[in-house]
Image (cartoon, rainbow, N blue to C red):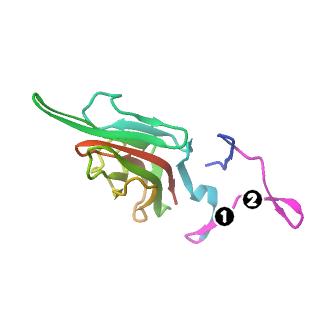
Amino acid sequence: MTARIRVGRELVKPKAIHVYKDGQWQKKRVGYVYKNGQWIEFIKYLIKIYENGLEFIKLESFDTGNGEAGWYPIERRDDYLYSESYRVTSASPFYVRTSFPSWVTANPINLTEHKQIKIRWILSVIRQNPNPTAYLVVSTIKQAGYTENDAIVSTTVRDTIVETILDVGDLTGDFYIRTHVPSGDGLSSLKIYSIEVV
């Protein structure tokens, strides 16, 4: 992964990195971290997937519900990823319509040298959902429900941005990273502000 810096709303590759020290600008190398007995470039150790509107690694969306596509949004907004989940039940004639939106990395990521995935998100109830839950999942399966996973963590905290951490230290190999917001009876929303692997 090549080091990039943010200039306005774009990511550009720097030609050099300079720091101001002892009254002059000095050219410096990208920082390193010591991991498993060796020095690793920090930019290679920390994998940013998404942060405040910038997509460092391509993400795709999908829906495991049975409702019509486009009923409720799953979209990129200026500073976050947004999705709404719903469940509507009718007694006569009986039917259940659902939308369970998810985001997933377009390609699997090697987690062998990594310990955690951190996500900053906010879960909200729009209508009639007493117990919404959002899930962060890693899996060898790209598109599936949240129960299909190799590691999982969830949050039920509502209306507050929280950081949730998924422990992946025991995993080796390539995995997709997914988010899910299934809904009980009613309508919920999820805003994702950042996802990174450390």
Q: Which residues are magenta?
A: 13-37
Q: Verify CB contact (< 8 Å) between mark 2 and mark 1.
A: yes
Q: Which residue is mark 1?
A: 32
Q: Please provide percent x and percent y for residue 179.
A: 39, 47
Tell me if 66 is positioned left or right of 81 in this view.
Answer: left
Mark 1 residue crowding within 10 angstroms, few (<14) / some (14–19) / many (20+): some
Q: Is residue 149 visible?
A: yes
Question: Residue 16: percent from the left, percent from the top?
Answer: 78, 51
- Going by the numbered disc 2, the residue's amino acid type is Arg
- Foreground pick, 76 / 17: 76
Residue 93 figure quarter = top left
Residue at left offset 89%, top offset 61%: 24
Name the residue located 50 percent from the left edge and 43 percent from the top edge: 80
Count residues near mark 2 (Cα–Cα under 10 Å), then give few for <14, some for 14-19, many for 20+.
few
- In the image, what residue occupies the spot 66% across and 50% down? 3
**Foreground: 70 or 145?**
70
Is residue 148 rendered to the left or right of residue 56? left
Residue 111 appears in the figure: no
- The outermost residue toward the right is 23
User: From this viewpoint, which residue is outermost toward the bottom?
Assistant: 37
Q: Which mark is residue 29?
A: 2
What's the distance in space between the residues labelled 2 and 1, CA to CA?
9 Å
Where 91 sits versus 28, above or below?
above
